Amino acid sequence: MTQATIRPLSGPTRANWIRLRTMIMLRWVAITGQLIAITVAQLIYGLQLELGLCYLAIGASVIANLVTTFIYPENKRLTEFENLWMIMFDLLQIAFLLFLTGGLNNPFALLLLGPVTISATALSLRSTLVLCSAAILLVSLLALFHLPLTTENGKVLAIPGLFIFGQWTALVIAILFTSAYSRRVTTEVHSMGDALAATQMALAREQKLTDLGGVVAAAAHELGTPLATIKLASAELLHDLKDHPDLAEDAALIRDQADRCRDILRDMGRAGKDDIHLRQAPLEAVVLESAEPHMERGKTVILTQVPGPDQRKDQPTILRKPEIIHGLRNLVQNAVDFAHSTVWVESAWSDKDVSIRIMDDGPGFPMHILGRIGDPFMRERSRSQTAISRPEYEGMGLGLFIAKTLLERSGARLRFANGSDGRPGTSGSGAIVEVIWPRAKLEEEIATNRQPIGRNQQITA
């Protein structure tokens, strides 16, 4: 999976998720609340309202709901355009009711924020801007034009003009702030959801590759003895039948086909059994497996182990988790992509930690995104700025997010820096990524998963 294969879902795409039935149910709730408010205002507080026009506005919503209920199926998903006009209709209907009931003197003017918030959460930026503009225009008109609220005694209920101005200012600010806040949070949530889905896909893919590796090893192990026996027997037959050319040719063919089977088992695998022995491996072997696909791409990849004098000499054994292999592979890929000529992968271990540092001699991470590396789907502005200094760059959003998420799931913590920010004596002058695991956690996982190496188990998924 490359970094550029998945993009965050756009507003129009998210709008298509909303069911018509959901909007209809929300509108029925609003209609019920409006009827209760008008009834209470008239019967309990004795307010004189234009009941005919009020019931006309509410009736329009009732008719719209009934028509859409009978015309469209219950599972219909609304398009961006349909959602926009449904929310616009609700906004105009609420504004008309406020016009009939005192305008901004009515405390229910806050309900104008409802349609705007829904738009910012579900619709595209363009639709949200249209609805925000319409809401601000309606608030401004309601501040100037409205029917007064009067009691049974003919007394007009109105707040001072200064408070009307304050109400207008508060509503305009609330429309802008609520829309921006809701949209920002919703975008973050959707981006994270999209990125986590991509992470699950990458993990599933790596799990399949890991299973295939076990398949090959298991097949080679289990078929090695019979193939060796066939090759030995065919060699003896070839020696004994040297006076019979026809039979010797058949024996040579058997030997050659046994060698071919050996080569096939080495290069590929098919659905079979999981090799229990390969569920764990030395740290060096896991690092080599992660870096191997990128070692023949025109850059020098140097793998080193650097246990210091105060460190253990015995190399740790870790589980060959797909998330570890795929996460390290993504980090090595990023280093190879941007290195000038050389990438260093240094493994180190002590009594407390096991660490892997991946360094390159490239230009390093751009400073303006260094603090946000690992966030999924960085904005286009950041990508365009990065492209100036790294024209081959395609994201550094999703790919590194996947690597960071998978490695953190295995218990690691990651540190991103440039050569000048790294520890003294670093081999690379460009980007540095350090992955650190607590050694106790790795050894605990090994102990938990340790089992006798017996018959290889059938792969079930």
Image (cartoon, grey):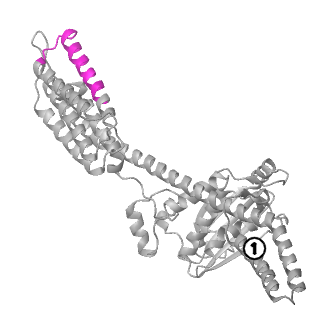
14 lies left or right of 46: right
384 and 144: which is toward the camera: 384
Residue 414, visible in the rendered structure: no
Which residue is pictured at 75% across the width and 68% down the height?
284
What type is the residue that disc 1 sits on?
Arg
Q: Main secondary structure of the magenta part?
A: helix
In the rendered view, would you say 88 is above or below 308?
A: above
In the rendered view, would you say 216 is above or below 336?
A: above
Q: Quadrant of residue 389?
A: bottom left
Which residue is pictured at 27% across the width and 21% down the height?
33
Q: Quadrant of residue 316?
A: bottom right
Which residue is pictured at 67% across the width and 50% down the height?
460
200 and 373: which is toward the camera: 200
Residue numbers of the magenta segment: 26-51
220 lies left or right of 176: right
> Which residue corresponds to mark 1?
262
328 and 231: which is toward the camera: 231
Element on which disc 1 rests: helix
Residue 398, visible in the rendered structure: yes
